Image (cartoon, rainbow, N blue to C red):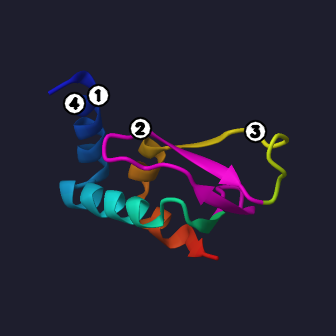
């Protein structure tokens, strides 16, 4: 087991995050890959975006903001550990558009 896996396992234990939750999260993310979604940010602001990638070994998810012209938008990155921290709420903030 590599360091990242140990760290993830330790974090998951603290959060009661199970292997089944991880499988559900991966299934969810893979099902919405390349689809337009609306995500409510922690500050409450809704953002229309596209989930650009979510491979089984991913650590980051690239999110493309659909409301800002390409070339003018910063690269938005969603860290998987942020999702793992609150998997249940993450599932609820995704609204398909």
Badge 1 or badge 2: first in the primary sequence:
1
Q: Are marks 2 and 4 in contact (CB under 8 Å)?
A: no
C-alpha span from label 1 to label 2: 10 Å
Disc 2, SS: loop
Residue 85: x percent and y percent?
A: 41, 50
C-alpha span from label 3 to label 1: 27 Å
* Image depth: mark 1 or mark 2 in front: 2
Report the residue at 74% width, 59% height from top.
66
Quarter of the picture holding the C terminus: bottom right
Segment colored magenta: 40-66
Instruction: Say whether residue 29 is left or right of residue 6.
Output: right
In the image, residue 60 sits, relative to residue 94, either above or below, namely: above
Q: Which residue is mark 4?
A: 6
* Total number of numbered discs in the rendering: 4
* Nearer to us in this view, 29 or 17: 29
| Furthest residue toward top | 3
Badge 2 or badge 4: first in the primary sequence:
4
Q: Which mark is residue 59?
A: 2
Q: Which residue is mark 3?
A: 74
* Image depth: mark 4 or mark 3 in front: 3
Instruction: Say whether residue 38 is left or right of residue 52.
Output: right
Q: Are marks 1 and 2 in contact (CB under 8 Å)?
A: yes
Q: Quadrant of residue 41?
A: bottom right
């Amino acid at each position: 087991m590599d360091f990242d896996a140990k760290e993830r396992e330790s974090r998951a234990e603290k959060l009661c995050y199970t292997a089944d939750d991880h499988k559900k999260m991966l299934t969810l993310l893979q099902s919405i890959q390349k689809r337009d979604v609306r995500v409510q940010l922690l500050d409450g602001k809704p953002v229309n975006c596209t989930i650009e990638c979510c491979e089984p070994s991913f650590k980051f998810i690239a999110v493309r903001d659909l409301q800002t012209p390409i070339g003018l938008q910063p690269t938005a990155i969603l860290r998987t550990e942020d999702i793992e921290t609150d998997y249940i709420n993450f599932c609820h903030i995704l609204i398909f558009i």
